[in-house]
Image (tube, coloured by chain):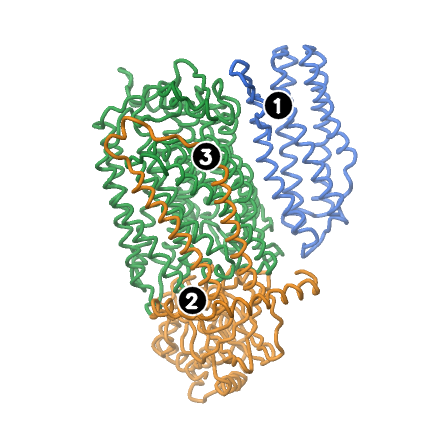
Chain colours: A green, B orange, C blue
Amino acid sequence: MATHTPRRHGGVFDVLQEWITTVDHKKIGLMYIGYALIFLVVAGAEALLMRVQLAVPNNHFVSPQTFNRLFTMHGTTMVFFVGMPILFGFGNYLIPLMIGARDMAFPRLNAFSFWISAFGGFLLYFSYLAGSGLYGAGTAPDVGWFAYAPLTSRVFSPGHSTDYWTLSVLLSGVGSIGTALNIVATALTMRCRGMKLSRMPLLVWLYVVTSCIAFIAVSPLTAAQIMLVIDRYLGGHFFDTQAGGSAVLWMHFFWIFGHPEVYILVLPAFAFANEIIPVFSRKAIFGYPAMVAATVAIGFISMGVWAHHMFTVGLGPEANAFFTFSTMVIAVPTGIKIFNWLATMWGGSIRFATPMIFSIGFLFQFLIAGLTGVMLAASPFDWQLGNSYFVVAHFHYVLVGAILFMIFAAFYFWYPKITGRMMSETLGKWHFWLFVIGFHMTFDFMHVPGLLGMPRRIYTYEADRGWGGWNMIVSIGAIFQTAATLIFVYNLIRSYYKGEEAGPDPWDAWTLEWSTSSPPPSYNFAEIPTVHSRRPLWDLKHPDDPDTNYE
Amino acid sequence: MVGSMNSGMVERFFAGFDQQAGFEHGVRRLHATQMLATVFDPSSTNIFAPKGTPAQSILGLSVLVLGICAGIFLVVAGLLLYTIIRYRSRPGDENHEPAQIYGSNQVELSWTVIPILIIVALFLASARVIFVTQKIPKPATALDVVVIGHQFWWEYRYPKLGIVTANELHVPVSEPTHPTPTYLTMSSADTDHSFWVPRLAGKTDLIPNKVNTMWIDPEQAGLYLGQCAQYCGVQHAKMLIRVYADTPEQFSAWVAAQQHVALQVPSAAAGREVFLHNACVNCHTVSGTEAKGIFGPDLSHVASRATIASGSVPNTPENLRAFINNPSDIKPGVLMPAMHLNDRDLDAVTQYLSTLR
Amino acid sequence: MSTAVAVSHSTEDDWKQPSRGMVGMACLIAAESAIFIIFVIAYIFYTGKSLTGPTPREVLDLPIFSTVCLLSSSITVHFAVHQLRAGKIGQCSAWLAGTVLLGGIFIGSTAKEWYELIYHHGLTIRTNLFGTTFYSLVGLHASHVIAGLIMLSLALIFSLQGKVNAHHAERLEVLSVYWHFVDAVWVVVFTVVYVLGR
């Protein structure tokens, strides 16, 4: 693998050319992950600036204009250029290895999808230079990540900053649909001999469901962005309230994407948990069919809950009641998952390696995130809490407390496979504990200002509202999270050079990616494997008691 | 909207439910509410210290939901904690794997059915509050106010009283024996906004091309604070709301004062001339003059208001003068331009506005 | 979606999975359908909500002839695939040429319709909500027809050059599925725009 053992005569340009022209799923996966990590740092820095501004009331650290750009860029970046690419990156890297294939179904489409998404991210930040056109100094978009109409119309958003936003999201959407298509095609048509759908690793199953949600959810966003482009460039009236257009229609279109998007992001996190928790509990996943069924159920129900983002829009009591119910229902399959993970650990022999402690953190925090979600689903409660800091705390609990924790777990778990070296366990524990402390300081206490009436997206607040102290704690927590993240990045780099040699199967795991060398050769498997159960390596290690007997 | 017969049935159903639930939970709710109210006491926008029926019924539901969620949390987090302690790997475990269990239909069925039951209960409780808040008939004694959201201020119109004002909403206190709720009919002149006074009611969005309604009934006289809760542009943060709940006497006095044509104090004639001969009149109205602009707040009684710039600063002559001189100093992003008046004109126009009680 | 339940054989010896191209096309169609559904919803939502004229009833005529052409092209492309599978390259070329011709007639009549709307009736994408939603929806469909025509023309050129043989039947079939999808979308657009919305 040329990445890790550079060719003797390979100059910088050779390496560069190799990566730019590659169609290897592993390299594309790594590029996705690397690109997402860069944006993670950028969007994290934006969050830090916002927390400095909000630490005390009536602060003048940044101007309102700057603050509005910061939260727009933070949200857009984190969802489209961190969350999506990092999860697609892991999917790209792992899916062919886990199903015993040598590449994705459409390698060139894969490269295209990556580069078009990457271009979208570049375009978003290019707005800082070019947002107000050639005559202005340039600014980033400031319409919020859900860009409600009519704030995005030419009247309220002159210049080109909103155009950069809409085009970058449009491109990222095209790339996401391309990758999603590739994942489904790979999982359905490239499995090795014997890997029936009922034997496919849960990770692959969850990625297939995520991808199917992407077809149905990301496409509406693409359609809505096309409409916005028509409005802004061709003088159309889709969201032009002056000409009879509807602001509420944009909300519907956006959230038909926006809510399933949460599941697009969280299902891969569940997917990692499905692989990591059994290995470190030393037990098979509890209730594989129920896990698949719950995932598919989440996929379907997620299509019918979007208007819980719109309880205050004036949908009428009947619609509010319907969306209250559908939103609460989604807690059932999600609950099944939590209980099945608990049951997997129950009776096991739990090893607290870094991937596992991050997974336990995930379970605990996802439980809380789910419960605050139930509170927000009760629409009258949402009339108070909607658009307040309680909501901000709730979805950061999902995005950071659940998804980011599982992404960290995935890094520690698969890093040895990707690089051939272990990450430092000591640094890993430091990373975990500092991050947990910082996370809980920030996001536990962030619920409180919401309960005390603090709306989101305000660049400053009045001193007499009693929000100051809480916000200070929230901001201090951000410092801990930053420190923890720096330790993580240092661990990533240090372990690449100094980490312990991992060998093909350092965790004594059971899926196919652990059967090949670390890092895997560009062709993945010298010989395409044949499998007879869900845990082919368990069968190899326990020939006396193979899984084949129980499935 | 469903048919009238249908909705009538719905109301009766939920009304019955309401009485029962209120009876059973009354005592416990009181305790929990007081506790939550004390914990967050210093805040003037605390959702746990309601002073109106909608906020009160939301709080009742909130306490129920919080209680159930806290119970679920304790059970599941307790299980998680027990599992990781009880089933931690011990020395010697490396040599053999634990018993492999692949699933159990009975167990999985139980943790599917129990959550469904909890959810149905929570849904019914929520639906009750939805319908009692959003489908209640409007009493004849209700006051009507039209609320129009602007970037970044509030316009309040009292169609039956002929009053137009801005940023400070005056409503009568609503006695339980003689309810005088205020019905707000809301829309927006530009982008989306949201009206949120946490101690009186939940929030309702103001959306261009759409009319929404909500109602408030403050049970105690006083000032209730809130602010715009839907991002509406640069100065979303300083689009503050002040609702004054007046006693019947105070309210009648306020109405009478607002219904007067704007005062013309002779000593402020110079300032009045400055006002009427500058761009002020393009955006502002002062009743009884040629100033009939509608893009900015009505200034006919601006001096009767406690604050300016949508609640940003107290309405003192100094603040008023600074605001007229360069509004962006006080409220960056405000749509009012700097007026570039000389000091003399600035003083005069400030003095004139201060007489508009 | 064409899931691969067909693979559940009891032995690992007989290992068959669905065709990559077909699965890929099914996914693409799922995603494209979602895009069209959003545009159709917008069209229906804004029907009759324009603040100014012209209205659909005043300016739209039923495009019966072009609809017949486009729907027939689904049949011709089906025969093209059929002939290619049988190894009859000449026949395949003829059917492909027919498909391209029928699709071309459809696009031509759309162009003519738009020309008349713009220059005789003064309806542009800026005029009112009807103009915005009409040109967007019909234009989105037309752009899909054009994309299909380009691919079909390429297939036609290759087959005339003799570079196509029976092994390519599956690829042409994937393309034909796309073409059927474009036709099916037209049925929806036709119904919504010219029948219900008029």
Q: Amino acid at mark 3?
A: Gly
Q: Amino acid at mark 2?
A: Ile
Instruction: Look at mark 1 in the image and give the residue it sits on.
Output: C174
Q: Amino acid at mark 1?
A: Val
Co-location on one chain, circles 2 and 3: yes
Q: In front: C45, or A105? A: A105
Q: Is residue B283 above or below residue A383?
A: below
Closer mark to the observer between disc 1 and disc 3: 3
Co-location on one chain, circles 1 and 3: no
Specify the subunit that label 2 lies on. Answer: B
Provide residue C190's location: percent of width, then percent of height.
Answer: 73, 39
Instruction: Look at mark 2 in the image and give the residue it sits on.
Output: B47
Closer mark to the observer between disc 2 and disc 1: 2
* Res A190 seen here: yes
Label 1 Cα crowd, 10 Å radius (few <14 / some 14-19 / many 20+): many
Corner quadrant of residue B147: bottom right
Provide residue A183's location: percent of width, then percent of height.
Answer: 49, 29
Helix, strand or loop under label 2: loop
Instruction: Look at mark 3 in the image and give the residue it sits on.
Output: B103
Q: Tags 2 and 1 in contact by the CB under 8 Å rule? A: no
Provide residue B205's location: percent of width, then percent of height.
Answer: 52, 62
